[in-house]
Amino acid sequence: MGRQTIAAKLILACAGLAGIVAASLPAHSPQATRAAAPRTAAPPTSAMTQPVVPAKQTSLPAPAAEPLMVKRVLDIGPIKFGDFTWDEAGVPAGPLIITVDLAAQTLSVFRNGYEIGATAILYGADDKPTPLGTFPITQKDAHHVSNLYDAPMPYMLRLTNDGVSIHGSKVEWGYATHGCIGVPLAFAQKLFGEARLGDRVIITRGKSLATGGALTS
């Protein structure tokens, strides 16, 4: 993986399917995600996890955008569904930005510009797609249960008033959500401990940035 580009972590759909498709983040783009979908992978089709019914809460505005340079991308290979990487050793304290690339089906966590975590995800498909854009985290609930579907959503980080969130899930090939972003439970627990209300989550489809570029909303 090149030190000057963010390389894609290609998700393996089945045994024998592997590869890494690299992409550069254009300097003008406000997003930073891992680019390129698996060559033969189709979007998941069956529902597995659900968003929650909107709850009463005080919405927090996204913090004013401040230039945050990409200083490091984790040097790891392909990520299978259910797998993740977390390495914050030596990374200084600083602002947190979470990036999600629906095309590559991956989520990355940047602290002070250094990538400290990456995982394969589930996301919304068909008639309940995961929305694109930049969203502040407006609510945290480690033991959340969906009011609509009576389904557990552990380590929930709410992104929208209509229930789209990041939460722990059993991440397997062939499954999808009703708009939420599902991540492995152990990864969700680490992310929950790291994230704060107001931290930005940038969701794109296939967009990326060059190392040294600015992460802004």
Image (cartoon, rainbow, N blue to C red):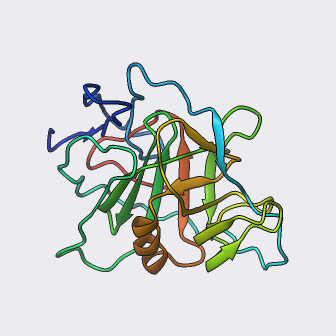
In the displayed structure, would residue 163 be above or below residue 210? below
Q: Which residue is nearer to you in this view: 59 or 210?
A: 59
Query: At x 60% / y 42%, what residue is drawn?
Result: 176
Q: Position of residue 9 (x, y in %)?
A: 30, 40
Q: Which residue is nearer to you in this view: 139 or 60?
A: 139
In the displayed structure, would residue 70 be above or below residue 126? below
In the displayed structure, would residue 102 be above or below residue 64? above
Q: Is residue 217 visible?
A: no
Give the side of residue 74 with respect to residue 111, left or right: left
On-image quarter of the C terminus: bottom right
Q: Is residue 24 visible?
A: yes
Query: At x 54% / y 41%, what residue is drawn?
Result: 204
Q: How many marks?
A: 0
Query: At x 76% / y 74%, what residue is drawn?
Result: 59
Give the side of residue 138 with respect to residue 120, left or right: right
Q: Position of residue 30 (x, y in %)?
A: 49, 47
Figure quadrant of residue 137: bottom right
Q: Position of residue 27 (x, y in %)?
A: 38, 40
Q: Position of residue 61 (x, y in %)?
A: 69, 70
